[in-house]
Image (cartoon, helix red, strand yellow):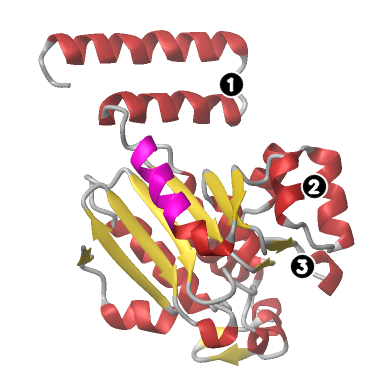
Amino acid sequence: MTTAAIDPELLRRGGLTFDVDGPRATITLARPEVLNAQTPHTWEALRAIGESVPAEVRVVVVRGTGRAFSAGLDKRYFAADEVDGAPGLTGIAALPDEEADTTIAAAQAGFSWLRDPTRLTIAAVQGHAIGAGFQLALACDLRVVADDVQFCMAETSRGIVPDLGGTYPLVHAVGYSRAVEICLSGRRVGADEAVAIGLALRAVPVAELDAAVDADVAALLAAPPKAAAETLGLLAGVAEGADPAQALAAERAAQLRRLRSLAAGEG
């Protein structure tokens, strides 16, 4: 396994590690002393990772160190104008509209690349996944959870809204009505319920989480790379609202590309 060529100071400041092992990359939230709480520097580092993932990487795993995936935004940012050189929530509120919008958009970009259909992303989630932690897990295509997981969309209860891209995948995963209830109540969603409502692929004992994710990665990498990429693109198109006719047309075009590629001996 190798560490990808990203500024190590950027990763350190963001509380992340990033490692590449052939077709698999692993992003690890590495601030267990604060339950992997996130900061704007975390989102900056995530954005840099998204811009630097090697082309040969087919699966990205996002995981946390210690007993939580991520407890959400670092508490220091809720009441401060600025912390560690980055604006807090009150600091963002004081910015001109365009600058505030740009600031939030930059944070969203740290999450949105995880839904790019050019590769598959898996969140390995244990313990608390609160607020920004929940949204980071939602940014991934699949979620495999430990049996102690506690998902919570806490933002609305605190007077703000989920703004890191979490609303779209949450509604697509569990439906509008259930997403409303989860967001507005701010309640915890445990492992069994997460699997039952489609929020998680499966739940396993905490001690087996890494092994379960490793097995999933191996199974998902079994498909030929180009066929897998085309299939991900088709499924993403449907998820984003393609109607039946558009989906059929996309399938025809993708299949023709595959057949011609295979005929040319390109795999």
Quadrant in the rendering for residue 265:
top left
In this rendered view, identify the residue nearer to me: 88 or 136.
Answer: 136
In this rendered view, identify the residue nearer to me: 63 or 208.
Answer: 208
Give the image location of residue 85, x and y in percent: 49, 89
At x 86%, y 41%, the residue is: 177
Label 3: few (<14), some or many (≥20) within 10 Å?
some
Label 2: few (<14), some or many (≥20) within 10 Å?
some
At x 55%, y 50%, the residue is: 144
Determine which residue is flagged by label 1: 242
Task: Please report the bounds of the magenta region as a residue range.
Answer: 211-220
Give the image location of residue 18, x and y in percent: 33, 67
Determine which residue is flagged by label 3: 155
At x 62%, y 54%, the residue is: 165
Task: Give me the disc on residue 128.
Answer: none
Q: Is residue 137 visible?
A: yes
Determine which residue is flagged by label 2: 179
Q: Amino acid at mark 3?
A: Glu
Marks 1 and 2, how far apart at CA: 22 Å
Give the image location of residue 120, x and y in percent: 41, 42
Q: Amino acid at mark 2?
A: Ala
Marks 1 and 3, how far apart at CA: 31 Å
Considering the numbered disc 2 on the image, is that residue within a helix, a strand or a loop?
A: helix
Quadrant that contains the C terminus: top left
Q: Nearer the viewer, mark 1 or mark 2?
A: 2
